[in-house]
Image (cartoon, rainbow, N blue to C red):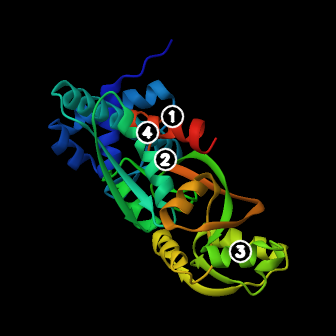
Amino acid sequence: MDWLNYHHLLYFWSVAKHGTMTKACEELRLAQPTISGQIRLLENTLGEKLFIRTGRRLALTEMGHLVFKYAEDIFATGQELLNTVKSQGNGHPTRLVVGIAEAIPKPLATQLLKSALKLYRPTRLVCQEDKLRQLLTDLTAHRSDLVIADTPAPPGTKEHMYNHPLGESGVTLFATAKLATQYRRGFPESLRNAPMLLPTANAMLRRLLDQWMVNHGLHPLIVGEFDDSSTLKAFGQDGYGIFPGASVIEHEICRQYRVQTVGQLEGLKQHFYAITVERRVKHQAVLALVRTARRELLG
């Protein structure tokens, strides 16, 4: 069995990260010939060239990019191990920083996050709500541990991210008792010209709803559009129109906003994801969240 020399990998990783041998020498406090020799040994072990010189800088080859990705994961895991042992050994709570996309229903996010609080170790939970793009920026900068979203991370993001499916839910329409009674009869044909409160056009749920309406030949009257799902539901609670929500938290929406169901949109599914910069989730609280979601909530 071949064994990887992690000192060689560390020297490669430092040079690849900085783009120059000089900065890597400063970080590692080693002479250039030492680092160059160790990288050559790594290339010999792998049987691949990892760098090409472009002017005064060192650029990664195609194989170099692949090895760098693995090195990032390996050293991030090592740092996480040290942080975890240090924090738990001192009796400090494990910290979980979660970014919640604006489109995520707050009752659903609450139920998902409760699973993290059931760990045998206490967890300090930090929740940050924002637009998905900003949350992904914070994730790649390691300012958060995961992002909960209703869409996978876009493929064009600079940093590689991993989408962990949490599950799916149907979509139900809700309204005040008066509106629900009126539009429940003859549903879904009753939705023609019905007053609707919808997510804005850039939201995944909105695109799904628009396509569903087109497929069923329905043209509701759009009274309002909202980025934030809680604001949308608050307007629905005040009787401004019919609004969508995840079927999996149907009872919670009815209880919290004092509304009733109008009907479920047959064949329409909303998907949810935990997005991390780890291929394999190692954070115990994140693991608890993912497993609970798949087993109990959205399975």
Residue 20 position in % (x across, y down):
28, 51
Residue 276 in view of the camera = no
Secondary structure under the numbered disc 3 in the rendered image: helix
Task: Give the residue pinned by disc 1.
Answer: 48
For marks 4 and 3, the one nearer the N-term is 4
Task: Give the residue pinned by disc 2.
Answer: 61
Question: Does the CB distance between marks 1 and 4 fall below 8 Å?
Answer: no
Q: Residue at x 62, y 73 (%)?
A: 177
Secondary structure under the numbered disc 2 in the rendered image: loop
Task: Give the residue pinned by disc 3.
Answer: 181
Give the residue type that dot 2 points to. Answer: Thr
Give the CA distance from mark 1 to mark 2.
Answer: 9 Å
Does 1 sit left or right of 120 as displayed? right
Eye-nearest disc, 1 or 4: 4
Eye-nearest disc, 4 or 3: 3
Question: Does the CB distance between marks 1 and 2 fall below 8 Å?
Answer: yes
Give the residue type that dot 1 points to. Answer: Glu
Residue 228 in view of the camera = yes
Give the residue type that dot 3 points to. Answer: Thr
Q: Quadrant of residue 295?
A: top right
Question: Does the CB distance between marks 4 and 2 fall below 8 Å?
Answer: no
**Quarter occupied by the C terminus:** top right
Vertically, is 197 above or below 59?
A: below
Give the CA distance from mark 1 to mark 4.
Answer: 45 Å
